[in-house]
Every structure is written in structure tokens, then in C-alpha cells.
Image: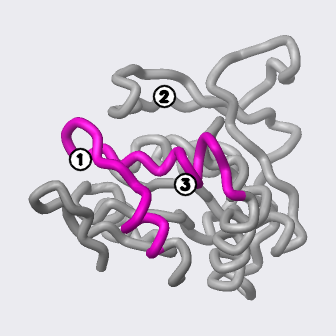
């Protein structure tokens, strides 16, 4: 997708290690027109896969997931990181670790919203190590559902997340792929 590619190359900033900051257009200050087009592109790639629900984790992937769900005409669920009074206590739960936040947490989805009849598309803004994605796969498995695949705006190919998922037989689609960071420059596939 030419527009996302251009925005990454022109605006993304490189943080410590290989952190790529796209918060100026994708996941903090959001360009909703761009995110809608990204969501529509990901939905197009999974059209015909029988998706009944879109699942993401709180919070950066929610906007993209909403546009994917709208394009596929299916509900969107986001796994909560904290148990609150607003979520049914009867949940599917899985542990995950965020390398960017350097902390572990539990993700939860109410059992009312995920079951064995669901074909779930997991959506996120950036696929790097894949830890949150693995936790979402675990939630779908606990519900007895099926996974249609994993869709991300950006995949960081220099990390193992996409490789691990593909070895597991999971279909992975990313709108753009960062191959590496070289001399302070983002190199896209």
C-alpha cells in the first residue's frame, strides 16, 4: 500500500533498539483516513475466509481492527489487559509479555463474545515478537474457535513473530514489512 509505505519512510522514527515509532499517524495521533484504508486492505485479503469476529488486544490495534471488522461486517472484540467491573468475570484469559513495555500482563475476553462457532481474524498495528498474538491465539483456542489468520498494518521481519506464526501454520498478512533498520534507516520489503 503506497500511502502507508510512504508514511513509514518519511515520518516513522527509530527508537532505542529497533523500536519503530509510528505514533504520529498509526497508533497515538491517528490518521483515520489512512487507518481506514489499511483496515480495508486487510479485510480484502481475508474476504472469503469465513471470518465471524475480529480480535485485537487493547489498545493500539483497536482502530485498525474496527475498520477491518466494519469492512468484513463482523463484530470486533478487544482483549482487555485489566479486569474491571465492566467485563464479565467469566473470561478466557492468557498471559503475555510486552517487550516494548517491558512488562507481563493477562489479556481477557468475556466468554459471552467468543465461542466454538467463531472464525477469528486477529488484527494488530505492528507484529514484532508476536507475544500478544500468541496470547490471542490461546484465547481463541480456549473458546474452541478457529483462527482465519493474523493481519497487521506493519510486520517487523527482523523479529521472530511472523516466522513463528507461519511455522505454526497461521496465515499472516501485513500491509507493509520492515525488513531491517540499517544505519538509522528503515528498509522495507
Q: Disc count in the image?
A: 3
Q: Write down the residue under mark 2.
A: 95
SS state under label 3: strand
Q: Residue furthest bottom?
A: 48
Name the residue at 51% across, 83% down: 2
Q: In this image, 102 relative to 64: left or right? A: left
Asked if the stretch drawn in magenta spans residue 61, the answer is: no
For the residues labelled 3 and 1, the Cα–Cα distance comes to: 16 Å
Of pointers 1 and 2, the one earlier in the residue sequence: 1
* Mark 3 neighbour density, 10 Å: few (under 14) some (14–19) many (20 or more): many
Q: Write down the residue under mark 3.
A: 125
Location of residue 181 (image quadrant): bottom left
- The image shows residue 151 at horizontal and vertical percentages of 56, 67
Q: In this image, 172 relative to 48: left or right? A: left
Location of residue 178 (image quadrant): bottom left
- The image shows residue 169 at horizontal and vertical percentages of 41, 72
Question: Do tag 3 and tag 1 residues touch (Cβ < 8 Å)?
Answer: no
For the residues labelled 3 and 2, the Cα–Cα distance comes to: 20 Å
Name the residue at 36% across, 33% down: 100
Q: Which mark is residue 18?
A: 1
Of pointers 3 and 2, the one earlier in the residue sequence: 2
Name the residue at 40% across, 55% down: 12
Quarter that holds the C terminus: bottom left
What range of the chain is rendered magenta? 5-31
Of pointers 3 and 1, the one earlier in the residue sequence: 1
Amino acid at each position: 500500500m503506497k500511502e502507508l509505505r510512504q508514511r513509514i519512510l518519511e515520518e516513522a522514527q527509530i527508537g532505542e533498539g529497533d523500536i519503530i515509532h509510528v505514533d504520529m499517524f498509526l497508533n497515538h495521533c491517528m490518521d483515520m483516513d489512512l487507518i481506514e484504508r489499511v483496515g480495508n486492505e486487510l479485510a480484502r485479503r481475508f474476504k472469503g475466509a469465513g471470518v465471524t469476529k475480529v480480535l485485537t488486544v487493547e489498545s493500539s490495534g483497536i482502530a485498525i481492527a474496527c475498520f477491518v471488522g466494519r469492512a468484513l461486517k463482523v463484530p470486533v472484540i478487544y482483549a482487555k489487559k485489566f479486569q474491571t467491573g465492566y467485563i464479565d468475570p467469566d473470561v478466557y484469559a492468557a498471559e503475555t509479555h510486552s517487550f516494548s513495555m517491558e512488562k507481563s500482563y493477562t489479556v481477557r475476553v468475556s466468554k459471552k463474545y467468543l465461542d466454538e462457532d467463531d472464525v477469528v481474524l486477529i488484527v494488530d498495528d505492528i507484529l514484532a515478537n508476536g507475544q500478544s498474538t500468541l496470547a490471542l491465539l490461546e484465547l481463541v483456542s480456549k473458546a474452541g474457535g478457529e483462527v482465519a489468520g493474523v493481519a497487521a498494518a506493519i510486520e517487523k521481519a527482523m523479529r521472530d513473530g511472523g516466522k513463528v506464526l507461519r511455522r505454526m501454520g497461521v496465515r499472516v498478512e501485513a500491509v507493509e514489512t520492515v525488513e531491517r533498520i540499517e544505519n538509522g534507516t528503515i528498509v522495507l520489503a
